Image (spheres, rainbow, N blue to C red):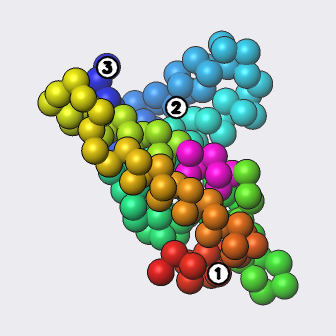
Amino acid sequence: MSWSVVSELRRERIDDWMLGKIIRLAIQELGVDEWIACREEFLIKILIEHRNQFHRIKDILINPQVCDYIHLHRFEDILYFHKESFEELIYWLFVTSIIDLVSQSETQKIPPGILERYETTQRFIEAAEGSRYRLSSLFTLLS
């Protein structure tokens, strides 16, 4: 199945067609425990839903499913997110954006934009560190 076909699937279709269970079982067959397989299934749904939105990180981060994925939580009236989950999300958004970029290229040459996307990824991670993993501070740093 090509990436363009996969990208047409929306989160709802995965659930409607019960593909989540197939994805989860395939991941478990790789030797991963059920909890991690469920989390990876969740990540795959997020990546499909937010395909081609790499530069719209603020919009992605306010999505309720993404908030769950990055473990957004309130402590002393401040919204924090989980460092490792955020970095994993950013990494996979970067990877899928590169796949999109390469798949749209009509030549054998490396398409322009890869370095820019890598630098954007690094900027997101540095901003997260600078925000001390506070969502409002991250949004301020990314503005």
Q: Residue at x 15, y 30 (%)?
A: 106
Q: Amino acid type of disc 1?
A: Ser
Q: Is residue 122 above or below residue 43?
A: below
Numbered tag placed on residue 137 in the rendering: 1
Q: In this view, does 87 lie above or below 38?
A: below
Q: Amino acid type of disc 2?
A: Gly
Q: Amino acid type of disc 3?
A: Met
Q: Where is residue 85 in the image (x, y as percent from the top left)?
A: 69, 51
Q: Can residue 62 be seen in this view?
A: yes
Q: Which residue is drawn at 69% across and 75% down?
A: 131
Give the mark nearer the N terminus: 3 vs 2.
3
Q: Can residue 12 be seen in this view?
A: no
Numbered tag placed on residue 1 in the rendering: 3
Q: Is residue 93 left or right of residue 108?
A: right
Q: Quadrant of the N terminus?
A: top left
Provide the secondary structure element on which disc 3 rests.
loop
Q: Position of residue 143 (x, y in %)?
A: 47, 81
Please name the residue that numbered disc 2 is placed on. Answer: 20
Numbered tag placed on residue 41 in the rendering: none
Give the mark nearer the N terminus: 1 vs 2.
2
Could you tell me how far apart the alpha carbons at marks 1 and 3 are, in whole angstroms?
40 Å
Residue segment shown in magenta: 85-91
